[in-house]
Image (cartoon, rainbow, N blue to C red):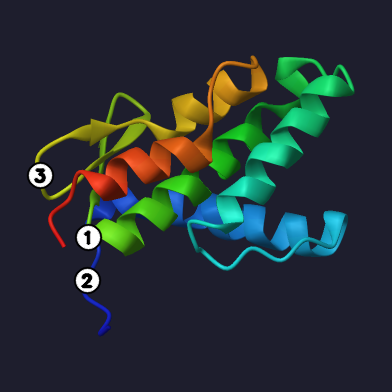
Amino acid sequence: MRERSRPRAAAQPVRWAADSVAMMREGARVRLDYSARSLWRVDRMIEEIRREGAPYAAVESELRGFGAYAGEVIARQTGAEWWATGGEHWLRTPDGRLWDPVDEARRCFGGHGSLRLLCRDAVNGVPG
């Protein structure tokens, strides 16, 4: 797949995702490869953080990074593009649907979401 230029809205999420990949590799010794399967590991990591009782404020930037990572997985699998407004970032898949993986990471932390399932839903809706 050849690299194409990315919209300006992608700059921050791409950086947040890369930071999460580095943090997981260096801190948790977990390798993330931008595959849909790797989101299972991310969901488990968020669940572990939640079970440890970390306050949201202490993990907010990590959750943002995990959501951005999930967004990058979706973007790479579907051709989705990042959009941004008012400091919020979301994805638009080629079928026109909007996805908010950063918010889904927050929902995971609250025990009500899954980045793996979000990716599955986003990928399954895009024509192959």
Q: CA distance from mark 1 to mark 2?
A: 12 Å
- The answer to whether 82 appears left or right of 38 in the picture is left
Q: Residue at x 77, y 64 (%)?
A: 25
Q: Is residue 43 above or below residue 16?
A: above
Identify the secondary structure beneath mark 2: loop
Q: Is residue 110 above or below residue 9?
A: above
- Would you identify the image quadrant in which residue 95 lies? top left
Hey, what amino acid is under mark 3?
Answer: Asp
The numbered mark at residue 20 is: none
Q: Earlier in the sequence, mark 1 or mark 3?
A: 1
- Would you identify the image quadrant in which residue 24 lies? bottom right
Locate the N terminus and report the quarter of the image it occupies. Answer: bottom left
Q: Using the rendered image of the protein, determine whether residue 12 is visible from the camera's viewpoint.
A: no
Q: CA distance from mark 3 to mark 2?
A: 20 Å
Identify the secondary structure beneath mark 1: loop
- The answer to whether 27 appears left or right of 120 in the picture is right
Q: Which residue is mark 1?
A: 79
Locate the C terminus and report the quarter of the image it occupies. Answer: bottom left
Q: Residue at x 22, y 60 (%)?
A: 79
| Residue 114 position in % (x across, y down) | 53, 31
| Residue 58 position in % (x across, y down) | 78, 24
- The answer to whether 126 appears left or right of 101 in the picture is left
Q: Which residue is mark 2?
A: 5
Q: Which residue is mark 3?
A: 95
Hey, what amino acid is under mark 2?
Answer: Ser
41 or 22: nearer the viewer? 41
- The answer to whether 104 appears left or right of 88 in the picture is right
Q: CA distance from mark 1 to mark 3?
A: 10 Å
